Structure formats: C-alpha cells, structure tokens
Image: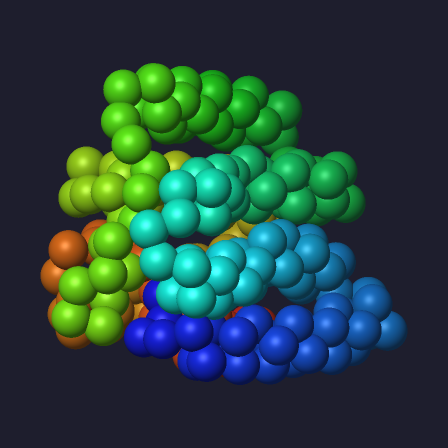
Amino acid sequence: MCWNSQSSLTFFILGNMINTIILTLSIINHKYNMIAFCLGWYFVITMQLLEYFIWSHKNNESYSFLAYIFNILQILVIYQSFISISNLYNVHWINKLIASIILLYYIFNCFYWTKNNKYNINIKSKHLIYPWWNNKKGLLYLFCLISLFLLLARPIEWSFIILSLILSLFFLSYIYYRPYVASMWCFFVVLLPIIAYFIY
C-alpha cells in the first residue's frame, strides 16, 4: 500500500531489484527456503505496479478487479512456493493436507465474496480503499498466512522468525491506517526480503 502513483512505481522497481539480488544470493548459497520466499514475493511486489495503475486511472474497475485477483491469490502463491520445496525439509503429509484444506476454504470464501460484491477501488485521504479488504477478510488472510508458514515453511525456526516479522509489519501498518488488518506499507515490502535473508 503506497500513497501515490510515483511511490507505487518506485517501490515496485526497487522491490524487484532487491528481491532479484536476494534470490540470486539464495541460489548461490543453496538457501532453498529463501528461494521459495523470493519467488512468492514477486507476486506480492506486483501489487505495487497495480496500485500505480489504480492511482493513475482512478475509478477504473478493470484495474481494481485485477488488483483483487492478485491480492487474494497471494495466499495461493505462498502455498505453492513452500509446497514445492517441502520434500527437501521432510514436511509431513498431514501438514500438507491441512494446509491444502485451509487454502481451499480461503479460496471458497474469496470467490463467494466475488459473486456478491463490487471491486472498484476508491481513494480517500491519500489512501486506496479496497472494498474487499475489510477486517473479516483481513483476519481470514492472517489465519491462512500463519497456518501456511507454521505447517509448510522450514526450518521451523526460520518460519517463526519470518512470520513474526511479517505480523509485526502488518501491525505497524495497521496502527497508522486502521481500516486494513493485513495490508503492508510498500517500503516494508521492499525491505522484508533483505531482513529475511540475513535474519537466519
């Protein structure tokens, strides 16, 4: 979440550059958990580009709908990123099954909302107002995010540290702008791969 089109585009470019550097270092140093994290993080960073278009083309429902799709599918991408390397860390099949059930429940809820609501994003006090990102959806997102990290992300120590960091950044963003439970300021999006790489 950024405050205008220029900041959104700047952090999109900067975020991709930094994430690519961290991904390259992770490949060189065989940090498979970070490889999965970085690949999934590209999807998160792309939200900044969509926000650039939304800021630049106000009241455009096509960009709003695309942002909605990217937003809700972040959980799916995170799931796919960690499930793809789960065998390297001997993640138990029961963990994978529970994670899959949670994912299906999340997607069902999101697409049920899709059938009954509009997507048009409005602007208020230099903030983008996401109609789908109310407290109920935000809490569901957080529940799925926490579950996927604890069930699939390994080593478990790394999972706890990164999850705690992400939740802390969500909390800091929420303190500043309360309508969104699970929205992260764009400069945090840029910094997180760096911290995640060096923290464990």
Q: Residue 36 vs residue 196: left or right?
A: right
67 in relation to 170, above or below: above
Q: Residue 78 vs residue 164: left or right?
A: right
**Which residue is drawn at the image coordinates 69% and 56% (left, top)?**
39
Classify the position of the C terminus by image quarter: bottom right
**Which residue is drawn at the image coordinates 62% and 77% (left, top)?**
13
Looking at the rendered structure, the number of numbered marks drawn on it comes to 0
Q: Residue 117 vs residue 155: left or right?
A: left
Q: Position of residue 125 (x, y in %)?
A: 15, 70
Foreground pick, 35 / 175: 175
Camera sees residue 128 = yes
Foreground pick, 102 / 67: 67
33 in relation to 27, above or below: above
Foreground pick, 145 / 19: 19
**Which residue is drawn at the image coordinates 24% and 42% (left, top)?**
131
Camera sees residue 190 = no
Q: Quadrant of residue 167?
A: bottom left
Q: Position of residue 80 (x, y in %)?
A: 64, 38
Classify the position of the N terminus by image quarter: bottom left
Q: Residue furthest right?
A: 28
Q: How is the image coloured?
A: rainbow
Q: Position of residue 184 (x, y in %)?
A: 35, 64
122 in relation to 113, above or below: below
**Which residue is drawn at the image coordinates 17% and 44% (left, top)?**
135
